[in-house]
Amino acid sequence: WLALMPNWVYTKDYYWAALGRSHGTADTQPFYIAPRKRYNYWTPRGRRSDLTSGGAKAKTHGHTNAALGIRTSPFVSFWYCGGFGPALRKRVTPPEGCVLCWSTEELPPGVLSESDPRRKVWGGGGADTRNVIGGLSLGRSNG
């Protein structure tokens, strides 16, 4: 299975309970694919009155597209993956622009949940982590 979910889901007890185990074994635990650049989502025109009416958020969500609507990035998200047998896990490679993490301990600093204590170690918090995914700055070319 593959599920694109917010970054905070892995810190919740119900996530691990839904998997039916604590953190699993190396061959059965979920793995994660995190983008190096924060995902943007498109909200159809007219669906977000706070953006279309010129409210405070309209100034921070300035990019629109006639076909797609208003671009937004309400939360950091990445792929949660599971149910792959050992043979298939060996063949998994991340798509271009993403990082493969075999456990939550390998998640890059930029995708850590605000409630993850490692975030403080990495200096997480504030605007910096909203603009950095996987250790790369979103506003600059990083090769």
Image: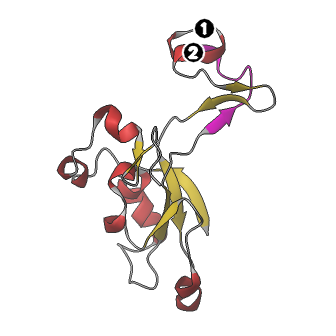
**Which circle marks residue 58 in the picture?**
2
Residue 86 position in % (x across, y down)? 52, 89
Q: Using residue 65 as the reference point, say whether residue 54 is left or right of it.
A: left
Q: How many residues crowd around disc 1 within 10 Å: few (fewer than 14), some, or many (20 or more)? A: few
* Residue 67 or residue 116, whichever sits in front: 67
Position in image of residue 22 (x %, y %): 35, 72
Which residue lies most toward the top here?
Answer: 54
Q: Amino acid at mark 2?
A: Ala
Residue 48 part of the magenta-drawn span: yes
- Residue 30 location in percent, x, y? 47, 72
Amino acid residing under circle 1: Gly
**Left or right, 113 with reference to 138:** left
Mark 2 Cα within 10 Å, few/some/many (few <14, many 20+)? some
Secondary structure of the residue carrying tag 1 is loop
| Residue occupied by mark 1 | 54
- The structure residue drawn at horizontal position 54% and vertical position 73%, both measured from the top left corner, is 82
Q: Is residue 106 magenta?
A: no
User: Cβ–Cβ below 8 Å for labels 1 and 2?
Assistant: yes
Disc 1/disc 2 C-alpha distance (Å): 5 Å
- The correct choice, above or below, for 90 with respect to 115 in the image is below
Quadrant for the N terminus in the image = bottom right
Q: Which residues are magenta?
A: 41-50
Compared across the picture, whether 1 is left or right of 75 comes to: right
**Residue at 27% over, 52% down:** 116
Residue at the farthest left position: 121
Give the residue displayed 40% in from the left and 65% down from the top: 16
Find numbered disc 2 in the image and state the secondary structure of the residue it sits on: helix
Q: Is residue 137 above or below residue 61?
A: below
